[in-house]
Amino acid sequence: MDRVSRHPMRRILLAAVLLVAMVGVFVVRLVDIQVVRAAELNQESTQVRSETRTLYGTRGEIVDANGTVLADSVMRYDIALSPKQAASGPLVREEPDPADPAKTIDVDVPLDQVLAELGAVIGKPAAQLQQLIDDSLAADPDSDFAYAAKLVDTETYEQVKKLDIPWVVPYEHPGRRYPNGAVAGNLIGFMGDDGDALAGLELSEDQCLAAENGESSFLHSLKDWVAIPGSEVVHKQARDGGDLQLTIDSDLQWDVQRIAAAQVQATGAQWATVTVMEAKTGRLLAVADVPTVDPNDPAGVASDDRGSRSFTAPFEPGSTLKALTAASVIDAGKADPLSQVVAPYRYLPPNGADINDSFFHDDTRYTLTGVLIDSSNTGMSLFGERLTDEQRYQDFLDFGLGNPTEVGFPSEASGDLHGGPDGWDNQTKYATMFGQGLTTTALQIASVYQTIANGGVRMPVTLVEGCRAPDGTVTENPSTEGRQVISEQAADQTSQMLERVYADGWLSDVWQIPGYRVAAKTGTAQVPDGQGGYQSGYLVSVSGFAPADDPEFVVSVSIMDPVKMNSSAASAPVFQQVMSQVLKKYRTVPSGAPAPELPATW
Amino acid sequence: MSALPAQTRPPRARAAQPRPDRRTTSAAAEPRLRPAPDRALGRAKPRLVYAIVAVGSIGVIAIAQLLLSIAMTQGAYELDGYQIRQAQLARDEAKLSEDLDGVESPQFLAANAEALGMVPNSDPVYLRLSDGAVLGVPTAADGGAVASGPLVPNSLIDGVPLVTEQQAAQTPSGGQGAGIGAAPAAEPAATTPPAPAEGLPTPATH
């Protein structure tokens, strides 16, 4: 009995000890694998078995005020080849057997022929591809990767796939496309081949537009790389970029660019800018810069022409600025449209400056209106000196000169006021009254006229309507808060004088828009040559607004050095065509009564 | 463990009674010993059923899993096929919408309008319905506007044939812009609209 009952106990004990020991070993191993080395092992296994895939986030679109797409994201493809594999021997390809069409035979295709086929598809000569392979192999005999073409379109991608060359591999590469070509290309900017924003709004609004790529991995079958169901793991979600809406109208922008480009061609000018702005809101409807970059092909124009001169190239505005001086003088109560001066051809103020008019005349008894109509520098000086330099400088700043506009365009210029009255010499003190000796951008001049047109209230210059995130939230809403710069009365009186300039000025036949009251002023400014003197060519400009009885639109035109017609007669037809197109497009009701008469002389 | 009571019980039963005659008691003693083998036999039968059920279930589960796995693998290939098809269709869609965006551009519209002989009129005239007043000065559009095509370039529509060229050729020229010409070219050249029979057409209302 003892033997029988004691023996099982020992066995049980032994078994228990063994069991505990084994479980212990397993637990230790389990903890080691699942906890201590878990991350390391997981990574190792993932590397061995799975394939990672990039989840592309879509960069946001740039759309115009009506939702027309100006820039959108598309999938493009990079075509890579393996030089080592290419050089390793002829390509074996299955082709129908000429003897028996039901069967196929293997045919050796020599490298020359393969390269010719590939070259025909991606648009490169076979010799160039051969050169690429030779160069890669010369640099590294084991070279296994070289780009044959970058950013090819879907059509080309499919043709390359159809060639079925084992050592040619296409890779996805998100690209950017601008369906309207050069329309607003100056504003939109463009992207580099590697996906970096290089210019324009693409660059300045990158934070809104940029997407973020995600990553996922999946297990696949060994031979044909079919994903095993349920094995996909998203490591990081892709994030789409936001859509950027502009205040630009793409149809109007196209028309304005067309008109400006035609005039640049006709007059042999270097460049031209045209700005169309809503008078009541400060929203930009069109900003044309000619020559204009086609963002699909930025290399098509010179590097200086790839931006927007309206924002980045300040110039001495010339006589268009006389409207600002006149408004300042009226606002300060020192004159009204009928105030009288006797303007000589040459005026020598007590401080030693020397002011001339651009045309010879005897002493003329001008009203302030007449000074603007004939664009007399001496007459303007006689009115401008009624204000202190400090007062005029403060008005410059209030009108937005000397600071970049609210748009914040990349490398937008602030214009140069030479530090205010303290930095002005005696000549500059007078020259600033008629737009020389200081620089402004085309946008700043448009903004000055917007202020005059809008009853003296300057509205922030707006180019971006907002940024719409993928979840629908809209940010970057533009400010709509205006600022009273001059009194409404001063603005209205200035506007009436500018109407007389339009009606009675020397270009009145050229820029007539039948049925509408228009206020406008020309400028023919000398351009610094960068060495203290002036170039021979002029920057000719026209700025104005219509309908003058209830201003809706501001148009500002600047043309640089139109060699075949070196006066503001070159810019006037552009102003006329653009303004009538704007009035027509927005169904503006023609003015009823004619502009009030104001005498130019006394 | 049931072997132990079976061993000990008969001696105890024997001790409780006076020794009987072997011949007479043998018949009475035999039934008392019978249950042990009976019970052993009775237990063995259900065990086999359970084993069959258990092993069978495992087999069924294994086969079911195998079938499921086969179905899933088959599904994976089907899924892969559909995904490839979807990618192909997405590429087709991208190609077509790229074509469409190109021909929607103002450059292409303007070039077509010019090719059809249209000219812009920059003098708008309005008819005010309240009093029939004509606002603005009616002026005929002057033709001879310069071709606007090259003025505002668009490299996306290079080589895409205009409406007029498509009508002359009648067949799309192939390539990326191939689909564009199909719709207008299909219609016969409606260059002159039919003149209305009795003045301006008016809608029939009752």
Image (spheres, coloured by chain):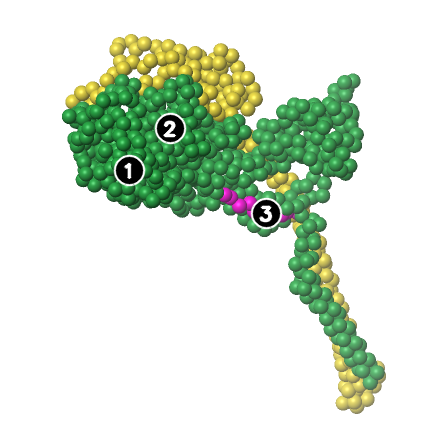
Chain colours: A green, B yellow
Task: Return the x and y of residue A29 as percentages of the image width and height.
Answer: 72, 65
Q: Give the range drawn in magenta.
A: A209-219
Q: Mark 2 lies on which chain?
A: A
- Residue at the disc numbered 1: A351
Task: Return the x and y of residue B132 as percentages of the image width and height.
Answer: 18, 20
Task: Return the x and y of residue A364 as percentages of the image width and height.
Answer: 20, 25
Residue positioned 31% across, 20% down in the render = B122
CA gap between label 3 and label 1 equals: 72 Å
- Between disc 3 and disc 2, the foreground one is 2
Q: Nearer the viewer, residue A112 or A504?
A: A504
Q: What secondary structure is marked by label 2?
A: strand
Assign the C terminus of chain B to one quadrant of the image: top left
Decide which of tag 2 and tag 1 comes sooner along the chain. 1
Q: Which of A543 and A528 is in front in this view?
A: A528
Q: Mark 3 lies on which chain?
A: A
Decide which of tag 3 and tag 2 comes sooner along the chain. 3
Residue positioned 80% across, 82% down in the render = A5
Type of the residue with mark 3? Glu
- Residue at the disc numbered 3: A215
CA gap between label 3 and label 2 equals: 58 Å
Could you tell whether A274 is left or right of B41 in the image?
left
Q: Which chain carries label 1?
A: A
- Discs 2 and 1 lie in a common subunit: yes
CA gap between label 2 and label 1 equals: 23 Å
- Residue B80 seen in the current view: yes
For residue A10, above or below residue A323: below
Task: Return the x and y of residue A576 as percentages of the image width and height.
Answer: 31, 22
Q: Badge 2: few (under 14), some or many (20 or more) residues near its Cα, within 10 Å?
A: many
- Residue at the disc numbered 2: A526
Type of the residue with mark 2? Gln
Q: Are marks 3 and 1 in contact (CB under 8 Å)?
A: no
Decide which of tag 3 and tag 1 comes sooner along the chain. 3
